[in-house]
Image (tube, rainbow, N blue to C red):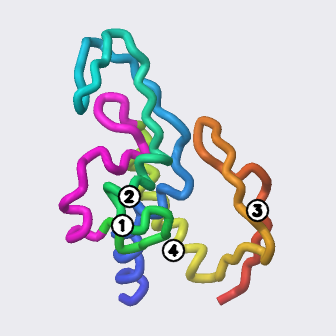
Amino acid sequence: MQGRRRLLLLGARRPELVDQPPKGLDIEKEKEEDEVDGYHIPKDSNIVLCPYVTHRHPDFWPNPEGFDPDRFTPERAAGLHRMAYFPFSGGPRKCIGNAFAMMQMPIILAMVTQQFRVNLVPGEKAVPEPAISLRPRDPLMMTLERV
């Protein structure tokens, strides 16, 4: 029963984990002329959305650079704009792997963390490298300690 409870808690925190790391950019082509927040957007303009920036914007998130497992509890997520967090894009172009990733992640994390404590080797730095998804530039050296 304890394992099931921990898995449910992990599942409630999975959005915070998905953002580590986010994809780099979303590029959309505006189909019609539009206006957003007083800015005119001509038809056929390319719109670039950057989840990395939005997911760390202080207007949406207190302590935006911190890892906060409670960030997406129902109480705290209730007031969020629906696009304040979009690791899989949104609308008709939302990634079809979204549901699979959100289901798979807590299961894999639960299986690994039941047996191991995973730590970054002291002195290792995760230097981000933007690509289709944001990832570490270099391999990260980790240690596994059996629990």
In primary-sequence order, the first of circles 1 and 4 is 1
**Crowd rating for badge 1 (residues with CA inside 10 Å; few <14, some 14–19, many 20+):** few
Where residue 60 appears, as percent x and y from the top left, is 32, 56
The residue mark sitting in front, 1 or 4, is 1
Q: Are marks 1 and 3 in contact (CB under 8 Å)?
A: no
Indicate which disc residue 110 carries: 4
Question: Of helix, strand and loop, which mostly describes the magenta segment?
Answer: loop
**Separation of residues labelled 3 and 4 (CA atoms):** 21 Å
Magenta region: 73-94
Between discs 1 and 3, the one toward the N terminus: 1
From the image, state whether disc 2 or disc 4 is nearer to you: 2
Q: Give the amino acid at mark 1.
A: Pro
Closer to viewer: mark 3 or mark 4: 3
The residue to which callout 1 is attached is: 62
Task: Please say if 133 is above or below 19.
Answer: above
Q: Whole-Å distance between the Cαs marked 1 and 3?
A: 28 Å
Tell me the CA gap for discs 1 and 2: 6 Å
Q: What element carries label 3?
A: loop
Amino acid residing under circle 2: Pro
Residue pictured at 36% horizontal, 77% vertical: 9
The correct choice, above or below, for 139 with respect to 30 in the image is below
Q: Residues within 10 Å of mark 3 (few under 14, many from 20)?
A: few
State the mark number for residue 58.
Answer: 2
Viewer-nearest residue: 1 or 90: 90
Relative vertical location of residue 140 with respect to residue 54 in this rendering, above or below: below
Membership of 82 in magenta stretch? yes
Q: In which quarter of the image is residue 44?
A: top left
Which residue is at the front of the view, 6 or 77? 77
Mark 3 vs mark 4: which is more N-terminal?
4
SS assignment at label 4: helix
Q: How far apart are marks 3 and 2 (CA)?
A: 28 Å
Where is the N terminus found, in terms of image quarters? Answer: bottom left
